[in-house]
Image (tube, helix red, strand yellow):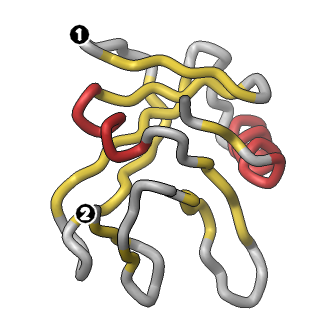
Amino acid sequence: MIFVADSAKAKIDDLRTSSKVTGEHFIRVSVVSGGCSGLSYKMDFDTESRPNDQVFEDRGIKIVTDLKSFLYLFNSTLEFGGGLDGKGFHFVNPNATRECGCGESFAV
């Protein structure tokens, strides 16, 4: 499962309203190579399903990821922070053994 914190749900709802994203759109999350710790998160709105997609819904937010990325994201929580640290969207990932200082990448 991939979870959605209240803070992330509120921001996603705001983005849907302000960017006129339809109800057909879902959040696609993937893990890609890159960043100073080796792996980075990629997230965007999408409408096209792919073979082997893993689909989750939490707090009314549909999140879709490929099977390989799900192995890294299992039991993670999507959060949004808009404070002084300016993190934006970020994952609390229990599978990560370390994260870079800026929180943009991780390692397992």
Mark 1 Cα within 10 Å, few/some/many (few <14, many 20+)?
few
| Amino acid type, mark 2 | Leu
| Residue 32, placed above or below residue 74 | below
- On screen, residue 25 versus residue 102, left or right, reads right
Viewer-side residue, 18 vs 93: 93
Residue 50: horizontal and vertical position, in percent? 27, 14
Residue 10: horizontal and vertical position, in percent? 82, 46
Residue 14: horizontal and vertical position, in percent? 78, 45
User: Residue sitting at 54 percent across and 47 percent down?
Assistant: 76
- Circle 1: element type: loop
User: Residue sitting at 72 percent across and 69 percent down?
Assistant: 81
Image quarter of the N terminus: top right
Name the residue tied to disc 1. Answer: 51
Name the residue tied to disc 2. Answer: 39
Tag nearer the camera, 2 or 1: 2
- On screen, residue 93 versus residue 31, left or right, reads right
Residue 101 image label: none
Mark 2 Cα within 10 Å, few/some/many (few <14, many 20+)?
many
